[in-house]
């Protein structure tokens, strides 16, 4: 089977590796689609994602597909099932898993390397999807589950004012979820005109740039600020524009070599709460249900569908990734 590897030093290679049958509680999935995540870009650029990166590694983790075989210990899946996979494994036994926090599992590792013709996650990481849900949309289950967890943390109250930085794929999902909370005013901060138009289409009340938000923040006590870019400048501004008793969610994956500066006195006088969000503990089922509901527009977010062999150039140039979500077509089944 084919697998797309990051081999180190900004290099990408599609290799032929052995196919195999599933063991124990593994579910063998023929991958239909895999989304390209910002962490894939980070890894290609020599940075870490959610964990330490030691190449060579197979990229991708936002995948969906069809079950082709199951291990002898599998109870709830069979060949032909249409599924999405949660790539983050929690052992269920360590001190963090015992507290319902598998995102901090002491043995946590990836179990669905989606840039491959087949993946073999354990049964506990596999979720059925309905026949009505396109498998390309089902591949959004992982990023959407991360968004769900982030919003669980800050608990947006209806009638609130929310500012959201960035209209990449995560920001676009986050905006649609924020709209469902009953927020009274949603302000998106995005410098690109096309993405500003997408923000308004997906439910934002305002789409402004990083200079305009400073003026707009004078007219609103912004109750929640969600940063979905991960840049030092936008994370610092997110804290700056937050209103009295606001909650700030730093959702974007920042560069560990560029720590942000916080005016702690300003945060103190505004009584801010600052949150971060790590992975997707126990939220994948809810993400699948949201996708099945039809309330999340994934097609509006997709900028390109590429073949596995085309990803080397895309990882290098980010030409399509800058415009939205790039989907990698494996089997391409729906």
Image (cartoon, rainbow, N blue to C red):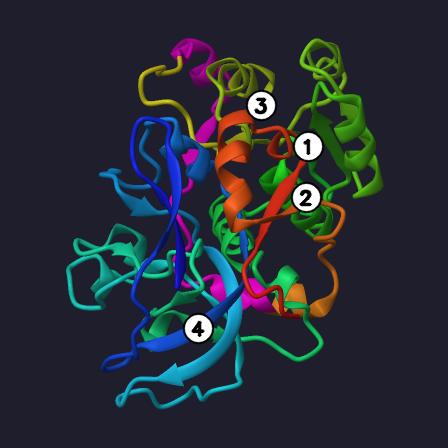
Using the image, determine if residue 46 lies above or below residue 100.
Answer: above
Which residue occupies 65% across, 61% down?
Answer: 137
Q: Which of 95 and 200 is in front in this view?
A: 200
Mark 1 and mark 3 in contact? Answer it, CB < 8 Å.
no
Specify the quadrant of the image occupied by residue 54. top left
Q: The residue tagged with tag 3: helix, strand or loop?
A: loop
Element under label 4?
Answer: strand
- Are circles 4 and 3 on residues that touch, CB within 8 Å? no
Q: Residue at x 41, y 26 (%)?
A: 254
The crowding category of the residue bearing disc 1, from other C-alpha atoms within 10 Å (few below 14, some 14 to 19, many at least 20), is some
**Where does the magenta region start and end?**
261-288
Residue for badge 3? 244
The image quadrant that residue 293 belongs to is bottom right
Give the class, few, some or many, for how many residues have Cα within 10 Å of label 4's Cα (few <14, many ≥20). many
CB atoms at circles 1 and 2 under 8 Å apart? yes
Image quarter (top left, top right, bottom left or bottom right) of the C terminus: bottom right
The residue wearing badge 2 is 304
Which is nearer the N-term, disc 1 or disc 3? 3
In terms of depth relative to the viewer, which is nearer, 9 or 84? 9
N-terminal of the two: label 4 or label 3? 4
Residue 71: horizontal and vertical position, in percent? 29, 85
Image quadrant holding the N terminus, namely bottom left
Q: Tag 2 or tag 1, which sits nearer the N-term?
A: 2
Asked if 46 appears above or below 55 in the picture, the reply is above
Q: Name the residue under label 1.
A: 323
Q: In which quadrant of the rendered view does residue 156 lie?
A: top right
Q: Mark 1 and mark 2: span between their CA atoms?
A: 9 Å
- In the picture, measured across the screen, residue 60 lies left or right of residue 46, that is right
């Amino acid at each position: 089977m084919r697998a797309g590897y990051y081999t180190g030093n900004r290099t990408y290679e599609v290799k032929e590796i052995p196919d195999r049958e599933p063991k124990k509680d593994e579910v063998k999935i023929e991958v239909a689609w895999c989304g390209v995540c910002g962490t894939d870009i980070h890894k290609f650029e020599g940075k870490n994602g959610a964990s330490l990166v030691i190449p060579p590694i197979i990229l991708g983790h936002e995948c969906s597909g069809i079950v082709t075989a199951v291990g002898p210990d599998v109870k709830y899946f069979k060949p032909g099932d249409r599924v999405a996979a949660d790539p983050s494994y929690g052992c269920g036994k360590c001190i963090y898993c015992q507290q319902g926090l598998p995102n901090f599992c002491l043995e946590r590792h990836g179990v669905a390397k989606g840039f491959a013709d087949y993946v073999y996650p354990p049964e506990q990481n596999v979720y059925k999807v309905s026949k009505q849900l396109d498998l390309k949309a089902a591949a959004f289950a992982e990023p959407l589950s991360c968004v769900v967890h982030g919003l669980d943390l800050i608990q947006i109250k209806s009638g609130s004012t929310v500012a959201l930085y960035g209209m990449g794929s995560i920001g676009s999902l986050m905006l649609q979820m924020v709209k469902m909370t009953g927020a009274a005013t949603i302000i998106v901060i995005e410098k690109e005109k096309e993405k500003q138009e997408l923000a308004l289409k997906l439910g934002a009340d305002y789409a402004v740039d990083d200079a305009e938000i400073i003026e707009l923040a004078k007219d609103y006590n912004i109750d929640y600020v969600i940063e979905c870019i991960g840049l030092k400048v936008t994370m610092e501004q997110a804290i700056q524009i937050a209103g009295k008793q606001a909650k700030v969610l730093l959702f974007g994956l920042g560069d560990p070599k560029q720590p942000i500066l916080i005016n702690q006195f300003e945060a103190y006088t505004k009584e801010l709460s600052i949150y971060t969000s790590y992975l997707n503990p126990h939220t994948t089922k809810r993400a699948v249900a949201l996708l099945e509901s039809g309330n999340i527009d994934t097609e509006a977010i997709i900028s390109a569908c590429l073949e596995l062999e085309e990803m080397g150039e895309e990882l290098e140039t980010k030409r399509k990734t800058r415009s939205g979500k790039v989907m990698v077509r494996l089997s391409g089944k729906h």
